Image (cartoon, rainbow, N blue to C red):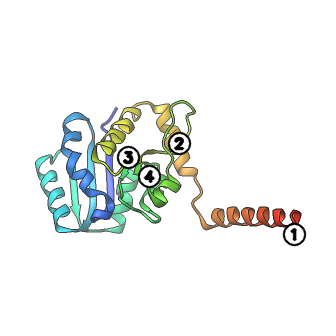
């Protein structure tokens, strides 16, 4: 089986959890067999870090500092795992775009990431990605390793891909759920006349 590709398309800021990656990316590269692709621009500290790692591990790491919409979509489509360890994320679009392309997300459980990505459960088979709760580099690393361990299991991996691709993130779905809740509350209030 080919080496999996882990990608990030992101602004290079602390909000996006990049200090976690700074702490463990090289250790992951030493212990796991994968390639890493990054597209983004932002804080000099992170741009410099990814340039350095790309130079040091040139055959396994590619870092493009800048942004190109078409290239971003090629990265989403060509990756196996999309990494998004944000410190906070009110909505998050990257994980949803990645899932539509069939890329399995690894995210931290915060904000919109927690609303859209559900960690794979080996007992029930449920989930559409892999998640970690604490803003901690080693928790992230453990979750990446967990995802990489499932990557060769084609039946599991294909289910994760499928669930991400068919998930409806549209406003129509949100409006439908809102309307259901409204009708339920209205029905309750009509039965409990004061």
Q: Is residue 86 above or below residue 193?
A: above
Of helix, strand and loop, which one carries label 1?
Answer: loop
Depth-wise, is mark 3 or mark 1 nearer the camera? 1
Relative depth, front residue between 184 and 169: 184
Q: Residues within 10 Å of mark 2 (few under 14, many from 20)?
A: some
The answer for how far apart the CA atoms under marks 2 and 1 are is 43 Å
Name the disc covering residue 194, or none. Answer: 1
Figure quadrant of residue 3: top left
Mark 4 / mark 3, whichever is N-terminal? 3
Of helix, strand and loop, which one carries label 3?
Answer: strand
Q: Residue at x 67, y 67 (%)?
A: 175
According to the picture, the residue beneath numbered tag 3 turns out to be 81
Depth-wise, is mark 4 or mark 1 nearer the camera? 1
The answer for how far apart the CA atoms under marks 3 and 1 are is 54 Å
Q: Residue at x 60, y 57 (%)?
A: 168
Depth-wise, is mark 2 or mark 1 nearer the camera? 1
According to the picture, the residue beneath numbered tag 4 turns out to be 109
Of helix, strand and loop, which one carries label 4?
Answer: loop
In which quadrant of the rendered image does the C terminus lie? bottom right
Please state the horizontal and vertical placement of residue 1, each as a whole percent of the image.
34, 31
The answer for how far apart the CA atoms under marks 4 and 1 are is 41 Å
Please state the horizontal and vertical placement of residue 111, each as a whole percent of the image.
47, 60
Relative depth, front residue between 90 and 117: 90
Figure quadrant of residue 139: top left
Mark 2 / mark 1, whichever is N-terminal? 2
Relative depth, front residue between 53 and 68: 53
């Amino acid at each position: 089986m080919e080496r999996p590709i882990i990608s990030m398309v992101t602004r290079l800021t602390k909000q996006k959890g990049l200090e976690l990656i700074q702490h463990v990316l090289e250790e992951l590269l030493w212990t796991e067999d994968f390639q890493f692709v990054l597209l983004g621009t932002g804080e000099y500290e992170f741009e410099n870090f990814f340039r350095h790692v790309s130079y040091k591990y040139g055959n396994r790491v590619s870092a493009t500092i800048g942004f190109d919409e078409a290239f971003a979509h090629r990265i989403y489509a060509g990756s196996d795992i999309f990494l998004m360890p944000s410190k906070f994320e009110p909505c998050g679009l990257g994980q949803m775009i990645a899932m539509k392309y069939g890329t399995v997300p690894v995210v931290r459980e915060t904000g919109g990431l927690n609303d859209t990505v559900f960690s794979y459960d080996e007992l029930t088979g449920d989930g559409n990605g892999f998640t970690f709760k604490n803003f901690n580099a080693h928790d992230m690393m453990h979750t990446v390793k967990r995802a990489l361990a499932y990557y060769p299991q084609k039946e599991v991996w294909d289910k994760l891909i499928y669930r991400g691709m068919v998930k409806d993130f549209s406003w129509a779905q949100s409006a439908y759920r809102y309307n259901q809740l409204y009708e339920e509350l209205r029905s309750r209030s009509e039965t409990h006349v004061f």
